[in-house]
């Protein structure tokens, strides 16, 4: 983990309120594990005080470039969306534990299920798995076609399906509808998205083997403040994990959703 002032290489809106931000810096050399995140200070004025966690979406080690995708939501991401090429951003990372890459062998199949702004970390994961000869099937869920992004990039890496709640792109409904209708077969499931989607996946495929990446509100991002604790399934009420430093990736079923 490093703290560095990285330089904005480009920033553009690629879907409704979804921004693609590319930054360059030496810290990028450490970003080899998909599912990890960075913690960004969005202004120099400590206003807002807290850093914002954003996932690693793609990395080009040769040019030391990190790609992040984020949804402009509140104060922090609105300020981030104003950053222009050449400006510096205070970035801390990479943080947390990413998706394990050694659970599958060449020729086996991974199912990647992403919902909304949970899709970005799965892109770097898909690239890594493909480079290891693992087949990747992706299912990406959005509210509508206007909110969707990167489906063609996932399609370059393997079978890719989209679901939208309003039916304006792909299957009408949820990612779980795609999994059911297409009768997808796979060896391991990786997913990131809203908790309600992860819960639905857990119910639909109760015996699923795999990993979920969780998004909890964070303070420090490094295990010091207890802002991000979650309870452990089957544990005592006092048993907990910290999403920032024990996760954000956990084996399916380990954490109470
Ligand atoms: P505000 O609502 O003004 O933020 C207020 C506070 O709540 C801040 O501390 C903020 O960090 C926190 N917060 C608000 N929403 C969330 C949320 N969903 N999850 C966690 N904290 C939240 N978003 C993306 O768009 N792209 C990503 O790649 C991405 N990766 C993430 C990875 C991790 C490990 C986590 C925990 C969150 C990730 N998020 C991602 C969510 C993102 O951090 C929040 O959308 C963002 O912090 C909102 O900040 P804001 O100032 O715009 O919103
Ligand atoms: Fe501080 Fe996780 S955010 S302990």
Image: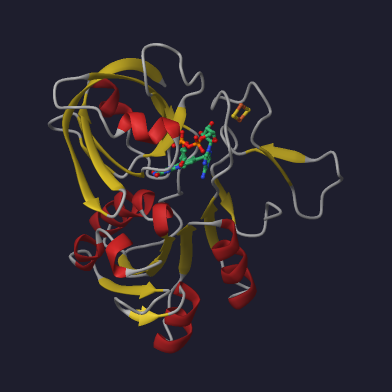
Q: Residue at x 31, y 78 (%)?
A: 170
User: Where 160 sits versus 248, above or below?
Assistant: below
- How many marks on residues? 0
Residue 228 at x, y percent in the picture: 64, 35
Q: Residue at x 55, y 65 (%)?
A: 197
Displayed quadrant of residue 60: top left
Displayed quadrant of residue 140: bottom left
Residue 116 at x, y percent in the picture: 41, 58
Front-most of 130 and 41?
Answer: 41
Residue 7 at x, y percent in the picture: 20, 21
Residue 5 at x, y percent in the picture: 28, 15
Front-most of 89 and 247?
Answer: 89
Q: Residue at x 33, y 73 (%)?
A: 162
Displayed quadrant of residue 25: top left
On screen, residue 36 versus residue 240, left or right, reads: left
Quadrant for the C terminus in the image? bottom right
Quadrant for the N terminus in the image? top left
User: Where 107 sits versus 8, above or below?
Assistant: below
On screen, residue 63 versus residue 114, left or right, reads: left
On screen, residue 236 versus residue 18, left or right, reads: right
User: Where 194 sits versus 232, above or below?
Assistant: below
User: Where 43 sits versus 23, above or below?
Assistant: above
Colour approach in the figure? secondary structure
């Amino acid at each position: 983990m490093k703290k560095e002032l990285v330089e904005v290489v480009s920033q553009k809106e690629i879907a409704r309120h979804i921004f693609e931000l590319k930054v360059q810096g030496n810290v990028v050399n450490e970003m080899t594990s998909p599912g990890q995140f960075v913690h960004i200070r969005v202004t120099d004025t400590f206003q807002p005080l807290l850093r914002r966690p954003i996932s690693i979406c793609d990395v080009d080690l040769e040019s030391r470039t990190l790609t992040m995708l984020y949804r402009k939501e509140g104060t922090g991401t609105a300020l981030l969306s104003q950053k222009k090429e050449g400006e510096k951003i205070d970035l801390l990372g990479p943080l947390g534990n990413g998706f394990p890459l050694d659970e599958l062998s060449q020729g086996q199949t991974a199912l990647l299920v992403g919902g909304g702004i949970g899709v970005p970390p799965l892109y770097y994961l898909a690239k890594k798995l493909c480079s290891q000869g693992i087949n990747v099937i992706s299912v990406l869920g959005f509210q509508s076609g206007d909110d969707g992004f990167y489906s063609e990039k996932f399609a370059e890496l393997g079978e890719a399906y989209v679901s939208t709640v309003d039916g304006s792109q792909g299957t009408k409904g949820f990612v779980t509808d795609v999994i059911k209708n297409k009768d997808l077969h796979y060896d391991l499931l990786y997913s990131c998205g809203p908790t309600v989607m992860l819960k639905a996946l857990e119910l639909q495929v109760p015996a699923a083997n795999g990993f979920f990446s969780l998004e909890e509100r964070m303070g420090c991002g490094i295990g010091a403040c207890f802002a991000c604790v979650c309870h452990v399934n089957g544990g005592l009420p006092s048993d907990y994990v910290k999403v920032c430093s024990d996760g954000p990736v956990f084996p399916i079923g380990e954490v109470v959703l």
